[in-house]
Image (spheres, rainbow, N blue to C red):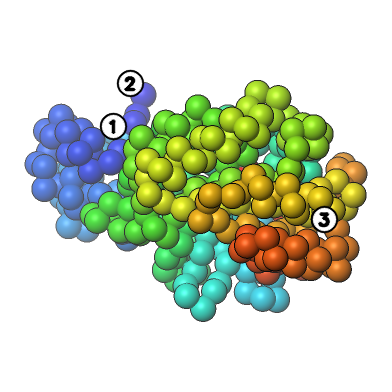
Amino acid sequence: MERVDIKSFDMEQLSEYVVSLGLKSFNAKQIYSWLHQKNAVSFDEMSNISKQARELLGENCFITNLEIAQKQVSKDGTIKYLYRLPDGNCIESVLMKYEHGNSICVSSQVGCRMGCKFCASTQGGKVRDLQTSEILSQIYATEADTGERISNIVLMGIGEPLDNFDNVIHFIKIISSKEGKNISQRSISLSTCGIVPKIYELAQLKLGITLSISLHATTNEARKRTMPVTNAYPLEQLMKACRDYTKTTGRRISFEYAMIKGENDTQEDAVRLSKLLSGFINHVNLIPVNPVDGSPFTQSDAKIIRDFQHKLTQLNVNATIRRRLGQDISAACGQLRNEHR
Ligand code: SAH
């Protein structure tokens, strides 16, 4: 009999499962707390559960844990982890320290099939989706390693979260559950390259999370050059889905715009961007693109970026230039995994 992945169960599923094994439903609360609050990595640690029950659990299920394959610490305190999954594949997570608390950037897939030309994570394509437990474990393992609480989560690591929809939604449910880490959905951001039907689906769930859209271009022609997803879902459809999302959820959307030299950084781009975003209570993050091995793109000059921001401000678009943490550890997501591969 195949053992089950106990860390991927939410509270209700765990209760049902535990009772099906012949244990009491209060055991489920204890186990859930061990797994999701105390970052337990084995049944042996669960000291308030009888030895017999722990043995039964060990025979029937397993606890997914991640191993640190590599760790890089930046001068600014940012820590980048290369985590090894139980099947040997590797993913990345990045811990960033801010005044308002610790924020972690987590991966949602091993590799990615979206094919964005400036992105390291997509080189080599998608290997597989991450299980819910594997997304959760990035947070638990990082807390265990640093001894610090994590208060903010961004789904901006390797992978396209909306291409692993069910596991990502289940992850959000568990990480925000009050019997678990109880991280407010307001403190969770999900970033997507723009899979339009999934944005509509997400809107229906009316989660409290912040949706972040990777825009990176202002015309379909230019966007197709860097982001093939535009072939399936052109900008008009994407922006319509964003408007629907805001209307349905009452949540604002943030937009990411990687500044790429000679690609998307003219004053005309700034004007088109302001038009695309008209009607949104919007916020644009301007990110100087990180140079990636095997990609021809370089970042726009600092002055061009400032002029771009200035133009947007004139046009009533609130734009910030992203403060880049972890510069010295070459931390565009996917790079560490590529070196490893
Ligand atoms: N697949 C999702 C989330 C992962 S990528 C998405 O596309 O949004 C997280 C963010 O980093 C996205 O905005 C992505 O476009 C951006 N990104 C990827 N490679 C980058 C690079 N080399 N420099 C700057 N930003 C990059």
Dot in front, 3 or 2: 3
Q: Position of residue 71 (x, y in %)?
A: 65, 61
User: In this image, 139 relative to 254: left or right?
Assistant: left
- Label 1 vs label 2: CA separation? 8 Å
Residue 35 percent coordinates (x, y): 32, 51
| Residue 207 spot, x, y in % from top left | 35, 46
| CB contact under 8 Å: marks 1 and 2 | yes
Labels 3 & 2 near each other (Cβ < 8 A): no
Q: Nearer the viewer, residue 289 or 95?
A: 289
- Tell me: residue 175, above or below residue 133: below
Numbered tag placed on residue 267 in the rendering = 3
Identify the disc placed on residue 60. 1
Q: Secondary structure at mark 2?
A: loop
Looking at the image, is mark 1 or mark 2 earlier in the sequence? 2
Residue visible at 34% across and 38% down? 205
Inspect the image, locate mark 3, and give the three-letter code of the amino acid beneath it: Gln
